[in-house]
Amino acid sequence: SDLRIMRIVAQWSLITMIFYSAHLALRDSDKMTFENRTREGLKFIEKNHPGYRLYMINNLGIDRDNCTAEAIPNLKDMAPMYVIGFSQWGVLTGSLLVLNSRSGCILSVMHAAWAAVGFNMYSLRAPFLKVMELMYSSGTFKNKYPSPCLPEKEFLESELHLDKSDAFKEEFMASQKTWKYGIGTVAFQ
C-alpha cells in the first residue's frame, strides 16, 4: 500500500515536471531561454564535432561545385523547431504517463536526455570535448572528395580538447535571463 502510494506520487511528480518543461518551452516567446540555449549548444557541436561538417557535405547532398564555407547548413538555424518539438514531445510523453504506459517511461528518459544535451550543453562542454578526444584519438577523417567547404584536415587530433566555437560567450550569459530546467532538474527527471 505504501509502495503503491509512493509510485503514484513519483509518477505524478514526473508528469508534472514534463508538463512544466513543455509549458516553459512553449512560453519561450522572447527566444531568450530555451531557444537561445539550444542555438548556442548546437553552435558548440558544429564547431567541435569532427563528423558534423563531413556528414553535412557528404550525406545531405550539398552541391560541391558551388559550396562555400558559409553555405553549409547549420543545425542552430533550426533551434525554434527543436524547442517546439521538445514541448510537443513532452505533452505526448506526459499523456502516455497519465495512461500508465511503459512507453511513456521510455519517452520520458529520452525527453530528459534531449533536455540535457539540447538545453544544457553549457554544463556538458568539458565532458563533450573529452568524448570527442577519446572517439577520435586514433585520427579524424580526411576529406574524401575535394570540396571548397571542407579543408583536407579540419580537425587535428592534438586540438580535439580545445573549444573552437564562439558559443557561450559573455553576451550569451548576459542575455540568458533565467536558467530554469537546468542540468539538476534534468537529472532528477
Image (tube, grey):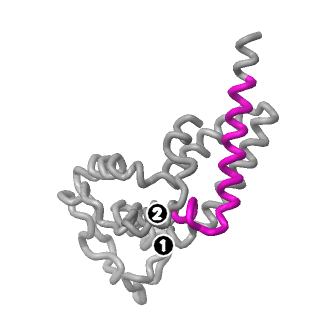
**Front residue of 160 and 8:** 8
Question: Residues at badges 2 and 1 in contact (C-beta under 8 Å)?
Answer: yes
**Front residue of 139 and 184:** 184
Q: Quick check: 143 above or below 133?
A: below
User: Residue 31 magenta-drawn?
Assistant: yes
Region of the chain picked out in magenta, as a range: 8-36
What residue does disc 2 label?
42
The residue positioned 52% from the left and 55% from the top of the image is 118
Residue 36, position as x, y percentages in the image: 52, 65
Q: Quick check: 175 above or below 103?
A: below
Residue 88, position as x, y percentages in the image: 72, 55
The residue positioned 41% from the left and 69% from the top of the image is 171
What residue does disc 1 label?
74
Which image quadrant is residue 47 in?
bottom left
Residue 123, position as x, y percentages in the image: 41, 49
Q: At label 1, which amino acid type do we have?
A: Asn
